[in-house]
Amino acid sequence: CLQVVLTSTNPLELCVNGMSFSRRASKWANSALVVTVSSHDFEPFQSHGSLAGVEFQREYERRAAMMG
């Protein structure tokens, strides 16, 4: 189970972190990137209709995996 918690120390910034309730015995780390998006960001994916936002997410997850 993972919970995203607020970790900001500056009131002008928004920063969050993932907190795991597991035994922390895994070789894998929990991480996330939280950003604001709007319907304008989905325009290149309009061929996917109402699932344009899902395809937007998949595209950027693929890019992140390639960069990682």
Image (cartoon, rainbow, N blue to C red):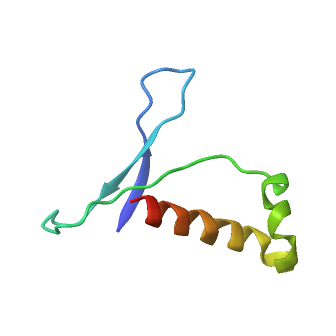
Figure quadrant of residue 16? top left
The spot of residue 37 in percent (x, y) is: 72, 50
User: In the rendered picture of this protein, how many numbered marks are placed on residues?
Assistant: 0
The spot of residue 14 in percent (x, y) is: 54, 33
The spot of residue 47 in percent (x, y) is: 86, 77
Taking the spot 37% from the left edge, 56% from the top edge, the residue there is 31
In the image shown, does 7 or 31 lie closer to the viewer? 31
Taking the spot 45% from the left edge, 30% from the top edge, the residue there is 8
In the image shown, does 62 or 4 lie closer to the viewer? 62
Figure quadrant of residue 20? bottom left
Taking the spot 47% from the left edge, 20% from the top edge, the residue there is 10
The spot of residue 67 in percent (x, y) is: 44, 58
In the drawing, does residue 14 fall left or right of residue 38? left
Taking the spot 12% from the left edge, 67% from the top edge, the residue there is 25
Q: Which quadrant holds the N terminus?
A: bottom left
In the image shown, does 56 or 68 lie closer to the viewer? 68
Is 35 located above or below residue 20 in the figure? Answer: above
In the image as oriented, which residue stretches furthest toward the left?
Answer: 25
Figure quadrant of residue 57? bottom right
Q: Which quadrant holds the C terminus?
A: bottom left
In the drawing, does residue 37 fall left or right of residue 30? right
In the image as oriented, which residue stretches furthest toward the front?
Answer: 66
